[in-house]
Each structure stands twice: as C-alpha cells, then as structure tokens.
Image (cartoon, grey):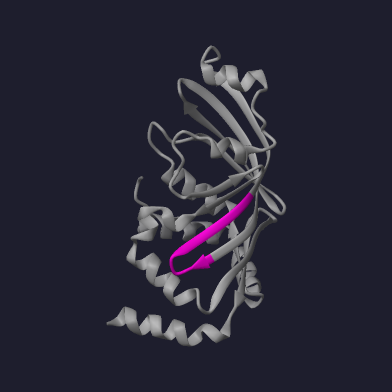
Amino acid sequence: MPKLRPKVLVHAATDYLKAHPEEVVRALRSAVGLRAGIPLDALRYLIAEVATGPKAPTDVVIEAVPPGLRAGLTIRAMGTTIRVRVTVFIEELDLGADKAMVTARIADLELEVLEGEDSPVAGLIKSGALDLSKPGNLVAYMPKRPELLIEAVDDRITVDLMKVPKLRDHPQVRRALDVAVPVVTIAGIQTKDDHLDVQFRATPTGIRASIAAVQQARR
C-alpha cells in the first residue's frame, strides 16, 4: 500500500481550508458538541492517494445519503470488470486498546458487468442467483476471507480494524488508543451536508487510566 506523504497532505489541507474557510467555523461548532465533521472531499482525496496500483479500484465515487454513505467503484475480479454500487450505514462501534470493531449495514448493493461477459463471475451475476439484499451472506462464503472480517450475516458486516497488521503493530496508533479510549469513545458516525460526522462521548472516569498511558509512553 502506498505511503501517505505528510507534507503533501498538509499542503492539500491548507489549500482546501483557504478555498473553504467556512470549514473552520464548522469545526469549532462541532468541537463544542463533541463532534468532528470530516469533509467527504478529504475522504475522496485520501482514497485517490492510497488506491493506486493494478489491483486497486478505479472510478471511485463517494456521496452522502444521510445518515449513510453511498459508494461506487469499478473492480477487476477473475477476468471480469464489475461496477459496484453500495450504501453503507455505520450502526455500532466498539473501540478499545486492542480492538476497533465496526458493524455496518449494507444496502442497495448493485453489481454491473462492464467487461468479461462470458466469464463465470459474469454469468453468476447476470443469472440473478446472488441475493444482493443479503451481502453479508455472500461475504461469509468468500474462499479467502479478510482477516479483519469478524462476522457477516444478512445485510450486516462486522470488522475489527485492529486485525490489520499495519494498524495493530503501528506504535503511534496503539499509543493513541491507549490514551484516548479511556476518556473518549466514538458514539456514532453518520453523514450530513457532504460531511462524515463523528460523534464522541466523554468518559471522565477514565482520566486516571489515560494519564497512566501517557506516563507509560514517556518511559
């Protein structure tokens, strides 16, 4: 996976804020309500930076369909080019020092064959044999399930992001979780006005554990 370039990200963020000064006011208002509003333009930019290479999805489109997120992307699978459209609703989060569980509901899944119409995959899609209303069941029977996949049933999928080695073994990510999780957790994520709004919930009783984590990190 390509590495993100911090200097490039800083310049891009600076240019974006110059063009959209209203984002500063929005950020201040959100902070008062323990929220963080992430412009979807930022998410689009990050995907464009990261999703590179011959196996990466192309023509990625992301848009808000409050409270969910609608995505469209083109992928290449087993000699077949497929256009995927799907809406995702984040329904539950469970964060801890050793876990980052996200449960999402998948809706409005559409698969369109663009190339390779004679392939077995294309035949399966066109036959209507796939129950696209229950994508979780399709994912559950994948021959090579991603390590981060915890559960997939009907229209719901649960993943643990801390199963991704680059996150799990990253010292700064682990340190940030050790410090932040005891005092603040994510209560919900939803879209609004072309933003991804993250709602936080404070837990003052965890301040002692957070301070201990900071002290441990300094040793």
Q: Per the image, is 182 magenta? A: no
Tell which of 1 and 144 is nearer to you.
144
Tell which of 65 and 22 is nearer to you.
65
In the current view of this chain or complex, which residue is farthest to the right?
Answer: 66
Residue 8 located left or right of residue 90 = left
Tell which of 158 and 86 is nearer to you.
158
Q: Per the image, is 102 magenta? A: yes
Q: Main secondary structure of the magenta part?
A: strand
Q: Which range is magenta?
A: 95-104
Q: Position of residue 15 (x, y in %)?
A: 49, 57
Q: Position of residue 20 (x, y in %)?
A: 59, 59
Residue 204 located left or right of residue 172 = right
- Residue at left 37%, top 58%? 6
Q: Position of residue 98 (x, y in %)?
A: 43, 65
- Residue at left 45%, top 23%? 78
- Residue at left 55%, top 75%? 184
